[in-house]
Amino acid sequence: MTILLLSLNCTAATLHYLPHFTVKDGLWQTRLSIHNPSSQKTEVRIRAYDDGGDSAGQASLVLPPRGGLVRDLETLLPTLASETGWLEIETDDTELTGMMVFTSTSGGSSSLSLSGDKGTHLILPFLQESDGWASGFALTNPNDSMATLTLDLLTPEGLLMESKTLEVGPRSKFVAMLAQTFSGTIPETAVLRLSSDVEVLVVALSFAEGVRQIVAVPAESFAPDVAGPETAAALRAQLQAEIEAPATRVSSILHVEAPELGLSFREGVGPVEGTHRFRARLVSGAVLAVLALQLAETGQLDLDAPIARYLAADLYSGLVVVDSRDHSAEITTRQLLAHRSGLPNLLEEEDSGAVPFINEILAAPDRDWTRTDLLAWARTHLQAKVLPGQERGASHLNDLLTVAVLESVTGATYDQMLDQRILSPLGMNHTALEGLAPNIPAPIASEWLEEIDVLDIPGFAFDRAAGALVTTTGDLITFFRALLKGALFQDPQTLDLLLEPVGYDEGFAHVGLGLIMIKDRDCLAPGARLIGATGFNGAFVLCWPERNLMVAGTSNFLPDSGFARGLEVIQTLYGPGACRDPGSLPRYATPEDAGFSADKLAQARLAYDATNSAAFLALYRGKVLVSWGDVSRRYLCHSIRKGFLSGLYGMFAQEGVIELDATLADLGIDDATPLTSIEKQATVADLLKARSGIYLPAASTTSTGRPARGSHAPGTHFHYNNWDFNALGTIFEQQTGHGVHEAFAQFLAEPLAMQDFHVVDGFDLFERFRSQHPAYHFRVTARDMARIGQLYLQHGAWDGRQVIPASWIQESTSSHSEIDVGAANGFGYMWWIEKTGGYSTRGSGGHIIRVIPEEELVYVRRVNTDRRDQGAGLSEVEHLILDAKLDEAP
């Protein structure tokens, strides 16, 4: 569907533009009326271009004083070589006026006067997509250079729905409907905002009843928002809040470059300035990956060749030993860059929460760890869990061996390569390997492990052998800006190799080779894309290429991640439309509306603040009563995963897909340590009740308190046992054909309209030296977990649909074992039965989904166990919330 549109913009060169024409026979009649209002005759020169910017014809004519003409376009340009395109009109008369009328043979007609705006910031304020109307736009680039545009689709209230980047070639034209341009839902009344690096012309097109009604309106120019003192103050407050939080961060640096907003912000809080240098830690992996791909471009390095081609065996041997076989020689450089090599993690925690390598450093703080030292320690103290290429697992050893490969290939030291290929060409004068830049005067920020300043402990510079850098936010932004422009590679498309997803991190991010990308997630408007990197000390970089936005910073705190901070900055700059909330739980306007005392709930909040919690959300009768902390952050669920799996079992048990009385022998279930014939008689129901009598090592567990093997027959004794729960995951996948996480997404997250969960938020943890059955872990937000509790409170029904059979809810939350474990006196099908009434599913560190049917109450508590926090008891909080209920509750 195409029409003839004319928009005139007079410049100093007296150029006018017709941004779109169509001359298809039998479809459109187009007539152009132009008038010379001056007392002198005026020569008019018309040049036609096709959609791709090639010349399609030209004509010249003279308008008499105060005279003009009205002609069909085909008559005006008899040699026109294209059915569609645009016109450039040059005249000596800057006051040229007129109108264009276009009529469809189907009956629709419209007109457009010779007026309009050409500019870099344009807006179409009314595009209708309802009551039979459909809208689009025509965009013309009259320049001799490429036009790069950002198109923002907004609601009339200003909520950003979707962003899209578009390139229009020199002297080219682009015409499209909104539904063709954007992938998401189009508002019934939409606003289109365009920002371009060169001046362009835009016209809105709206159609009804096919083409029986046509409206064409030129865009209006607008002045883009410039971030003023209020924005800087908001960023400054965000920084200050970080060091005042319970996490006890001592210092923080934030650097924002947002040319679109006229903003350049670079400050530090605590004992640092914004210009301080700091340890980049794993952010350095992006630099390392670039160097590797530069060598791959020139054919010096084969990313898919085994590292045995480049390294001596004594360097890598013995690092990935699985089932008594050494697989280390099979590792490739690509696997090292993707952290899929199977190499164990130097910073791996024990079940107690301790990190042996950190303890080793603290025991000998002055030790300077060399590459040989680190590899030898890993061989002695760490155990590989997976084969090369199987799973992603971040490890400094990947970067360490990558450095060794690059040095072997080039014959140069890593710092020489770094300087020659990256630092000097980009002018990164404040960046170097730690200890190798004594002439750089900028101070280095302290780095904190709990209350210990580790900057002056040589051992904590251990990742220098893995290419870790000391840098500034300014240098990191310089590097990423050059990288995303393709300036660091011979072929700009090599950047795509860095962004190709090889795994997931942070519960929401695609991981490439040294880079992390967040795209099309509900934390962003559809079409937005963030690229960056993060370290385990709070160092991070986030780039929004479509907006030329760069955000970098560090908290200098171990362990910490910076991505959440970066997303908060984006929301501060671009408002709630940038970090979207696609839907939310219903909530009470005031506690009194729910029949609760606001004053007493305030007392409950004070009690909650003393529990070292990260988030708390309570639902009363299905609506939010209180919401404290970050209920939108995906924390590890730990053993709450078992309650999730119990619900999935209920769906498939009812259909007969899973039989609860089937034995492990019937199902062919075994393990790395073979089961005995008696153990194989345990049933699925026994495992659900933690009464299997199988006492073997399991993933994500310890041997503490485990009964002696063979001490209890299946079905006779309760023992909370991860072997049972992990094997249930294997059985579920075997019998249903669905992965645990995929089933959760399809059969629970989708019908419950979870706001945050995606299937990538789940992952399997294999510990094959213990068991062949993985632990199926989840990262889920408090507000999504609350939906699970509410589903159980509603006997498995949600929004008129029976998601989990009501009979299963009753059976799985009834006690099948009399116990005395903490707050529980019974255990159902992977749900705890509470002494004070109701039931719960709990996770290590204090995570809980608590359901109290007699009070019509559900609550969820989250703890930041990512940094090994432990939550205190919630009995007082629960008591105060229940006590807050008024006598005359509605």
Image (cartoon, grey):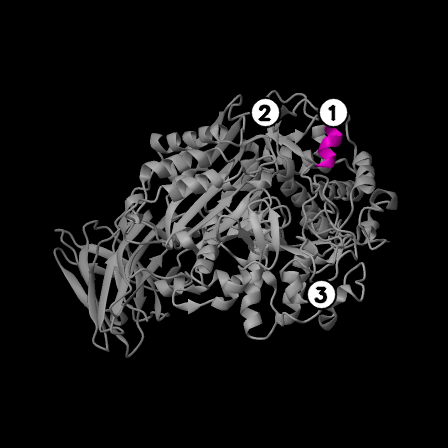
Q: Position of residue 535 (x, y in %)?
A: 61, 38
Residue 716 lies left or right of residue 110; in this view the side is right
Q: Position of residue 444 (x, y in %)?
A: 61, 24
Q: Main secondary structure of the magenta part?
A: helix
Which is nearer the eye, 312 or 535?
535
Q: Which residues are magenta?
A: 355-362
Labels 2 and 3: the sequence-earlier one = 2
Residue 554 lies left or right of residue 49; in this view the side is right
At label 2, counting other C-alpha atoms closer than 10 Å, the crowd grade (few under 14, some 14-19, many 20 or more) is many
The residue under the point 49% across, 26% down is 268
For residue 265, above or below residue 875? above
At label 3, counting other C-alpha atoms closer than 10 Å, the crowd grade (few under 14, some 14-19, many 20 or more) is many
Figure disc tally = 3
The residue under the point 45% across, 43% down is 616
Quote the CA–CA distance across marks 2 and 3: 57 Å
Quote the CA–CA distance across marks 1 and 2: 19 Å
Residue 205 lies left or right of residue 630; in this view the side is left
The residue under the point 56% across, 25% down is 276
Labels 3 and 1: the sequence-earlier one = 1
Name the residue that disc number 3 marks.
682
Give the numbered dot on residue 365. Answer: 1
Name the residue that disc number 2 marks.
445
For residue 610, above or below residue 632? above
Image marks 2 and 3: residues in contact by CB distance under 8 Å: no
Quote the CA–CA distance across marks 3 and 1: 51 Å
Quarter of the N terminus within the rendering: bottom left
